[in-house]
Amino acid sequence: MIDVQNLTKYYGDFCAVDNISLTIEPGRILGLLGPNGAGKTTTLRMLTGFYTPTSGTIRVNDLKMPEDTLKIKSMIGYLPESAPLYHNMLVYDYLDYVARLKGMDDPGRRLSRFKELSRLCGLSGIMAKPIGNLSKGLRQRVGLAHAMMSDPDILILDEPTSGLDPNQIAEIRDIIKGIGREKTIIFSTHILSEAEATCDRIAIINKGKKVADAGTEQLKQNARHRSVVRLTVQNAEITAALDHLKAFDANLDITVTDTPASEGISFELCCKDDKDIRRDLYLSIKETDWIITELARQSLALEEIFHELTREGA
Amino acid sequence: MTPIKTIALKEFKDYFISPIAYIVISLFLIVTGWFFFSTFFIYGRADLRDFFALLPITFSFFIPAVTMRMFAEEKNVGSYESLLTMPVSFTHIALGKFFAASAFAAAMLLPTLSYPLFISFIGNVDLGPVAGGYIGAVLLGGAYCSIGLFASALTRNQIIAFIIGCAICFTLTIIDRMLFFVPERLVPVVEYLGANAHFTNISKGIIDSRDLIYFASVIFIFIFSTDIAMKEKN
């Protein structure tokens, strides 16, 4: 259980984090969302004890910062943004150093933990390589192994998937979901789909202020819904098709999207409310001789909320 | 104690993984060897007095070069963040790095032990001043290491760390030669602040508690300042 109250951080005159309060239940995954420079990293750095807050309290279980910082640090595994590591060390030496600093004095325990982490983070082939020679994705995995070394109850990950290729993003996400069943995880990201796919709860911050904090599902339901249906038809003429769609529902917001002519004509149909129009749309098109090749609904709930809450001047 | 040992060992190994150690040690040996032996045979005295007389000056350039990367590089690469979020305190880190740097300074002196060995073949070496000199050299090295560490904790730029470190060490080294600028009443105070006089005493073979306390206090003051500088920056 992490309890953060009225956390504030000033850099000189600049207020990076303004009065943020958060509570995180054990065994949950919290996503910290926000545009660049919103204060995500600063918040996480204060949670890990790297920065001292200007004011506000941080409690982990019944421990309190700054009195018990050392004890709290030993409960937290932290992956900083861009996983900074010692470039001249070998991966194995680095992990050994980390394990010793985290108080794993028994060599047998260290070795078995290395084997476990090597399997979990896919490090087996690179144990004897200098960290400086690794690619960004591999470094990120070494950083993840660093964070999970002492099997901490709380994992704090700062943009764990930034700069990775799609395969690596999927892998890291799987790892996070896997460990999230038992551990408390807080991670920051600015990729909405990622937060939506992995988090139990999402907190959105903008310009240092918390602007939303709710369960992922709840957050989506609370939003002023707007659903978009993508429709691609072949064997149709564009003006006739537009007329037909307008006749179908005058309230639809219709845009024609760019598609190769061989694919047919694509539309994005935007509904003002959350009504599912696919069924009726199909029935109305069935009467014509068009061929439907795509009819899919996209929910923009989270994106909508995000834009609304983090707009300039909001 | 364990985190200090772990950090010290890692930092000490770091010197020898990269080429820094070998370059610095070679340069140090060339410089000290050149200045010492260029006049050694002219005077014809079988002692290391001239070697130790030069040491404070050479150390005030070489030690900051050894310590400049200790915090500055970590801050620059960002590994400082990983280090500070592990269950270690500022004091653990400062002491670990201090012991590593001091051990390296001692390692730098190690090859020069061959000087008294060779000199003993050609003359009678009085071992008292030699032993005293090496004890003094290690203390001086430790004191300058703590100064260099402090300079490194102030900035993320290694060159600035080097220059600040040099400036402080050099001031402590030559301050007792500037006594004629100082008002008469302050002379004893300023004289006591200079590292040179204390080191010279020990290297004559006189181990005086005042000199030991001097080096111990310089080390304490600068490690304490390093600790404060680290806390202040976060």
Image: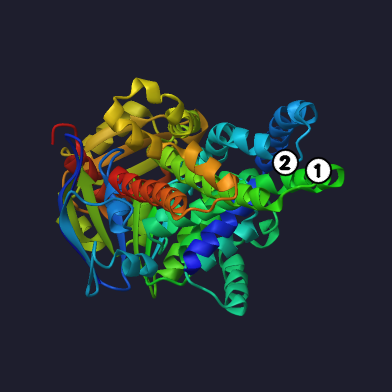
What amino acid does circle 1 point to?
Ile
Relative to A161, does residue A149 appear above or below in the rendering? Answer: below
Q: Is residue A202 left or right of residue B75?
A: left
Q: Is residue A304 left or right of residue A286?
A: left
Please state the horizontal and vertical placement of residue B12, each as a whole percent of the image: 60, 53
In the image, what residue occupies the spot 48% across and 62% down? B4
Circle 2 residue: B47
Q: Are marks 2 and 1 in contact (CB under 8 Å)?
A: yes
Q: Is residue B74 left or right of residue B35?
A: left
What amino acid does circle 2 point to?
Asp
Name of the residue lying farthest toward the top: B181
The answer for which chain carries disc 2 is B
- Residue B67 can be seen in this image: yes
Q: Give neighbour class at mark 2: few <14, some 14-19, many 20+ (Cα, 10 Å).
A: many
In the image, what residue occupies the spot 60% across and 50% down? B205
Cα separation between marks 2 and 1 = 8 Å
Residue B119, disc: 1
Relative to A25, does residue B68 appear above or below in the rendering? Answer: above
Tag 2 secondary structure: loop
In the image, what residue occupies the spot 29% across and 58% down? A47
- Residue B70 can be seen in this image: no
